[in-house]
Image (spheres, grey):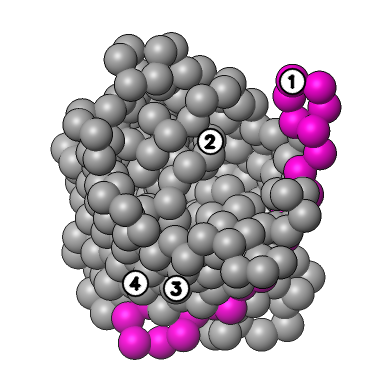
Amino acid sequence: LPAGSRAAFQDLGWGARPYGMGGAFTALADDGNATFWNPAGLDQLERKELGLMYLKPYLGLEGLDWGALNLTYVHPVKRGKTGVLGFNATSFNMQDLYKEYTLSLSYARLISRTMLGGLTVKYLYHLYNWNDEIRSLGSPVVNAGDSKGKISFDLGALYKPGRFNFGVCLKNINQPDVGLYYQDKVPLEVRAGLLYKFGDIKAFEDVALAFDTSYRNQGWAKDTRRSYYLGAESWFKYHTFGLRSGVNYTGSDLNEVTFGFSFNKPLGTASLMIDYSVAWPMTIKDTMGTHRISTG
């Protein structure tokens, strides 16, 4: 494959709530989505959580049939002492020509009164569906097989001294080689975030403003290595409804404008959460946006 087209296990923006904030979630990470964004944030959870998300990129774009699913389960063992466990399974299907699967296990615990730490171990697996025409070309890549799997590691930290949160996450620290024939390493990604919690402002509950920046150490498309994310969130009616919005940049170019909302319904000792977000791409035309919906 041409170097410019390689994007194995690129960040798809898992989770409807984080992406409603433009992808600025590293320093917030206070729900099951933390398994992907910053595993350290899992230790903020006090209850079990089960979630399912569906992602439809670039809805309405002719000839494009992509989709992704994400299943998450979080299990607090003994908060502050034993820690919190998180399980994540994702699948990404690109028109049945290419598929990616990830299984991950995360662990987080309190390090000090204001510091949380987390680790994620992931199994990355991707599969190509070579047709007879492609196989007949005799390419060494095709002859090498149609799938590859490797182990990868993420490491996260979250510092919560007061109204400010600081978060950092190192993804794919070991940069696993998932190439079938030629070397194709999944790049190390360094992500850092800052969150300011305004608290309640009249009818607006738990108002928060977040900023993230990331650097992906990829050897191609070097002008897209750096990305920036800005988002805001507020809840209403005793956390029954949530609204959020954000933007993100790739390099110096505005990439997406995002919006999202939540509905939270108490059900006895549990609750039902529905999150939705839409991201409008600024560089792609003839699409109705990338949509994410999750329930938990």
User: Which residue matches tag 4?
Assistant: 227
Q: Residue at x 36, y 43 (%)?
A: 38
Q: Residue at x 64, y 76 (%)?
A: 280
Evaluate if marks 2 and 3 touch, with contact meaning CB atoms under 8 Å apart: no
The relative height of residue 78 versus residue 72 in the rendered view (above or below) is above
Image quadrant assignment for residue 119: top left
**x, y (%) of residue 178?**
30, 39
**x, y (%) of residue 143?**
37, 36
Sequence order check, earlier mark of 2 and 4: 2
Specify start and end residues of the magenta stretch as a single range. 250-271
Q: Indicate which disc residue 32 carries.
A: 2
Quadrant location of the N terminus in the rendered image = bottom left
Q: CA distance from mark 1 to mark 4?
A: 40 Å
User: Which residue matches tag 1?
Assistant: 269
Image quadrant assignment for residue 152: top left
Q: Nearer the viewer, mark 2 or mark 1?
A: 1
**x, y (%) of residue 216?**
26, 61
Evaluate if marks 2 and 4 touch, with contact meaning CB atoms under 8 Å apart: no
Q: Indicate which disc residue 137 carries.
A: none
Q: Residue at x 60, y 69 (%)?
A: 201
Residue type at numbered disc 4: Ser
Q: Nearer the viewer, mark 1 or mark 4?
A: 1
User: Which residue matches tag 3?
Assistant: 230
Answer yes or no: is residue 36 visible: no
